[in-house]
Amino acid sequence: MAGVSRSTSPISTKGADLLRGLAILMVVAYHAFGPQYGFYIPWNGWARDPGAAPSQAVVWFYPITLGWAGVALFFVISGFCIHYSYLRSGRFDARRFFWRRFWRIYPAYIVALAAFTAVARLDPTTPDGARLFASHALFFHNFSEQDFFAINASFWSIATEIQLYLLYPFLLMMRSRLGLPWCLAVLFLVGCGWRLASVAVWGLPDHLIHWAWSGPLMTWFDWGLGALVAERFHGGRRTFSRPGAWLIALIPLFAVSTLYKPLTMFTFTLAAGISAVALDLSLQMQWRISLGMRLLAFIGTVSYSLYLWHQPLLFPMSRALTPLVGWTLAWVAVVPLLILLSWCSYSLLERPGINLGERLWPSASRRGKIPIK
């Protein structure tokens, strides 16, 4: 791998920071490409039909249409970070955990939600507007086909992420009784059961990012893969002793699953499996400092804000810039501008929200409202 040297033992989580930057760039590329050329090649029965593609660009640049896999990578990294933090502390305080998650996620999210609600001219005082806004504000809009892509289509995965946080204490309870590997076996069976039930009720969807396939029971195993990597990493071990062999096996399976409709039930999980191998491999590397690595790590740092803001702004920003610099330069400029906006969101919303939560926690504890264990 260019730019890295192999380390004899795990030394840092820099690899996770870099992969987070890669994940958001994959998602941004996917959202920039899809509206112009098509998000996927249509199905003809159980196979893709290139002849029915909305454009030849979808066929020639098919890997870009798989940029949604960056979300699977995000879930794996999230599972790793949450569980690694728990392992390092040696204890789990549910109140402290959810307090910190709230102040980490909600301040930037609610500002973005309010902004895009206003842009969409949604009236929260009407019954439909109130329901739609409340479903997003309370993170259950991914359970409704009508609400799933409303306001900001990217918000579905944030709701799923919050629901996975709510399930984390149950994962820890299962882990204490079964051990994490057996927990993952249980989670995989739960996911398979959900897949079979959803297919029986709603059929196989044309697109993988679908409300019935994006709930926490479907993605719990994928998130848990990150937790497994964290547990092995914390213990000074590798999760995948032969990463090359795993990648040689998983990548073709993933590719085939995107082309054969019945296998799409496992496409997201296969993407998560590849992500887990990549994460485990990256954690064994001693990353050299370079401008490219610094830039990717910076993008990883602001990736949450970039995820919040990018999708609804990509095309309005490019249209606004096109009369000034032309179409090509407009698209060259729009991503750096979005990264700049994300840095502002990170600096003005994310970090202050985290700091405010830390300041409020001791005072809340002294009042006896949220006792520290």
Image (cartoon, helix red, strand yellow):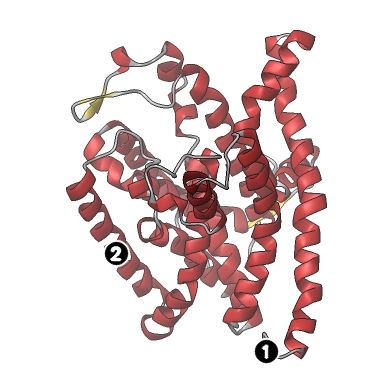
Q: Position of residue 221 (x, y in %)?
A: 39, 61
Disc 1 marks a residue whose amino acid type is Pro
Q: Is residue 364 above or below residue 252?
A: below
- For this rendering, which residue is in front, 279 or 189? 189
- For this rendering, which residue is in front, 3 or 211? 211
Quick check: 157 left or right of 298?
left
Q: Image quadrant of residue 337?
A: top right
Q: Crowdedness of circle 1 by 10 Å Cα count: few (<14), some, many (20+)?
A: some
Q: Crowdedness of circle 2 by 10 Å Cα count: few (<14), some, many (20+)?
A: some
Q: Position of residue 27 (x, y in %)?
A: 56, 37
Asked if one can make out residue 73 in the rendered structure from this viewpoint, the answer is no
Q: Position of residue 240 (x, y in %)?
A: 46, 60
Q: Is residue 199 above or below residue 178?
A: above
Total numbered labels placed on residues in the image: 2
Q: Which residue is mark 2?
A: 190
- For this rendering, which residue is in front, 87 or 107? 107
Calculate the distance from the C-alpha at mark 1 to the C-alpha at mark 2. 34 Å
Quick check: 306 left or right of 189?
right
Residue drawn where x is 60% and y is 72% of the image: 98
Q: Position of residue 368 (x, y in %)?
A: 70, 91
Residue drawn where x is 30% and y is 41% of the image: 264
Q: Which residue is mark 1?
A: 371
Asked if one can make out residue 63 in the rendered structure from this viewpoint, the answer is yes
Tell me the element at label 1.
loop
Q: Image quadrant of residue 25?
A: top right
Tell me the element at label 2.
helix
Q: Image quadrant of residue 185?
A: bottom left
